[in-house]
Image (spheres, helix red, strand yellow):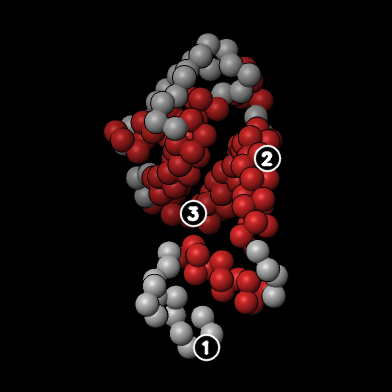
Amino acid sequence: MTGGNESCTAGPTSMSYLTCLTYILEEWTGVEDIGDYLSYAFYILWLFFPLVVVFVLPGVIVVLFYASILWLHIYKRKNEIKEAYSHDVWIAAREMLATIWDGHGRIWHGPGLVVFYHGATPIDFVYFTARLHIMKKRCCSVVADHFVFRLPG
């Protein structure tokens, strides 16, 4: 790769995309053996990934709770007049929140969900109702712990 217009596949030998990217990064930064630095960076990311899963993803649950509450509050204020003349104005809000919670449940739990009795938080119920609403377009009525009614919003 001597010229600025040459590609990595030009010439008698073609190279893989990652090798080409390594050469481009070496030329751009001026650092020799940048592949060693990149492999070390990937090792550090792999090493600290469990900490990210343990501390960041539960924080996302709290953020999603408050974002859902804020979304429903704004949606209610926006549609106060329409509610008097419409059959059910909350369909769009339910669909959006169910999609968000179902997506988070798929990321956090994968294809399965373990439902347990008297958990620390009622997050499993939120995932279940989101999935039920998306799949069957039905709402679920349940008997809930007092903690559910102490959540703000």
User: Tag on residue 48?
Assistant: 2
Q: Identify the image quadrant of residue 58.
A: top right
User: Tag on residue 96?
Assistant: none
Q: Nearer the viewer, mark 1 or mark 3?
A: 1
The Cα–Cα distance between marks 2 and 3, rounded to whole angstroms, is 45 Å
Left or right of 130, for residue 148: right
Of residues 72 and 64, the one drawn nearer to the viewer in this rendering? 64
Q: Position of residue 83 (x, y in %)?
A: 44, 49
Q: How many marks?
A: 3
Spot the residue most to the left.
Answer: 136
Residue 101 visible in the snapshot: no
Label whose residue precedes the other's in the sequence (2 or 3): 2
Helix, strand or loop at mark 3: loop
Helix, strand or loop at mark 2: helix
- The reply to whether callout 1 and callout 3 are in contact (CB within 8 Å) is no
**Three-letter amino acid code of the residue under disc 1:** Gly
- Residue found 37% across the figure and 50% down from its top: 86
Label whose residue precedes the other's in the sequence (2 or 1): 1
In the picture of the structure, the residue carrying the numbered disc 1 is 3
User: Tag on residue 79?
Assistant: 3
- Residue found 39% across the figure and 71% down from its top: 14
Left or right of 101, for residue 56: right
139 relative to 88, above or below:
above
Q: Identify the image quadrant of residue 55.
A: top right
Q: Position of residue 92 (x, y in %)?
A: 41, 49
The quarter of the picture where the C terminus appears is top right
Q: Identify the image quadrant of residue 57.
A: top right
The Cα–Cα distance between marks 2 and 1, rounded to whole angstroms, is 39 Å
- Residue found 44% across the figure and 80% down from its top: 7
Helix, strand or loop at mark 1: loop
79 relative to 105, above or below:
below
148 relative to 75, above or below:
above
